[in-house]
Amino acid sequence: RLDPILDLQVGRGEGADDLQPIPFDVEYNLEIIRATEVWANDVNGTGVVVANIDTGVRGTHQALRGSYKDDEHSWFDPVTGSTAPVDDNTHGTMCMGLVAGSLEIGVAFGAQWIACKGLDTEGLGYQEALLSCGQWILCPTLPDGSKPDCAKAPHVVSNSWNSVEAGTTWFNPVIDTWVAGGIIPVWSAGNYGERGCASLGSQAPNTGVIAVGSTNEDDRISWFSSLGPGPFDADTIKPDIAAPGEAIRSAHSQQDNTYGRGSGTSFAAPHVAGVIALLLSMNPNLR
């Protein structure tokens, strides 16, 4: 089994252990992408289902429990076999909070979320689990793997992980099938910017995904954000877009009312997934 090192460097810049009480004000990341202007027009992602593959989600967190889709096909865990949303790392909770969290942390707080735990407590994943999650996203099952129902697939899936070896293609058939099924994949570009050009993570170069780089409060590219071109085609422009990814506040999995900060393209990608949810809530026919 391949052991991919994943894009979970939340400690670069700010620490994820910066726990806070209930958030007070909308922070720069949501202002800079103008999400607040969209909310003012009564657009918040209602009617859209979002998903992620990550370390899990603390489903009882006060910013996330209200937006959990909460039916029999909304959670899958091929890593530990849990039957309800949990997160033993916090990365997945922070990422989902930025997509669909309430209390002024999520871009599309009116959307519903589902999730697959494909990464373990150390943030590591194996092909077997990640491929199982990929299949589940396309056709969600009950937590025990039974009764697949493709009609319950999400509209968009956010991924903040990459294989350790750039240019690997083992997950490409999953991505291609998602796209063919009308699911929009979003991917973090990777945190390897110090390596210079062609430092993208493994899945970000795929032309079927929207690869997301990271920016800071000054709207400049983060020093750690991976750069293109991709390893397969030097003419392909990657990343496709950039979003805030430095000192980002979101839900933390330690308790139901704790929040933390993190930096990385891991936190940039969920912003784009959230924006897609806003767009789809206005026009469900977008692809």
Image (tube, rainbow, N blue to C red):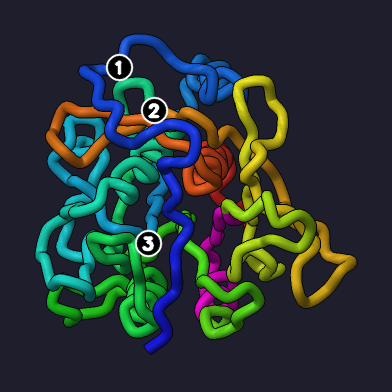
Pointer 3 or 1: first along the chain: 1
Which is more toward the observer, 270 or 1?
1
Q: Which quarter of the rendering shows the N terminus? A: bottom left
Image vertical order of residue 193 relative to residue 250, above or below: below
Q: Residue at x 56, y 18 (%)?
A: 31
Q: Is residue 284 visible?
A: yes
Give the camera-side residue of 179 and 167: 167
Q: Is residue 235 magenta?
A: no
Helix, strand or loop status at disc 3: strand
Q: Earlier in the sequence, mark 1 or mark 2?
A: 1
Of labels 3 and 2, earlier in sequence is 3
- Which label number is shown at residue 249? 2
Report how far apart the C-alphas of labels 3 and 2 lie in the structure.
20 Å
In the image, taking residue 253 as reference, residue 110 lies left or right, namely right
Residue at 25% over, 36% down: 252
SS for tag 1?
loop
Tell me the amino acid under the disc marked 1. Pro
Q: Is residue 277 visible?
A: no
Q: Secondary structure at mark 2?
A: strand
| Quadrant assignment for the C terminus | bottom right
Mark 2 and mark 1 in contact (Cβ < 8 Å)? yes
Question: Which residue matches tag 1?
Answer: 23
Residue drawn at (51%, 43%) of the image: 264
Q: Looking at the image, which residue is at 37% across and 21% down?
A: 104
Per the rendering, the mark at residue 53 is: 3
Q: Quick one: label 1, few (<14), some, or many (20+) residues within 10 Å?
A: some
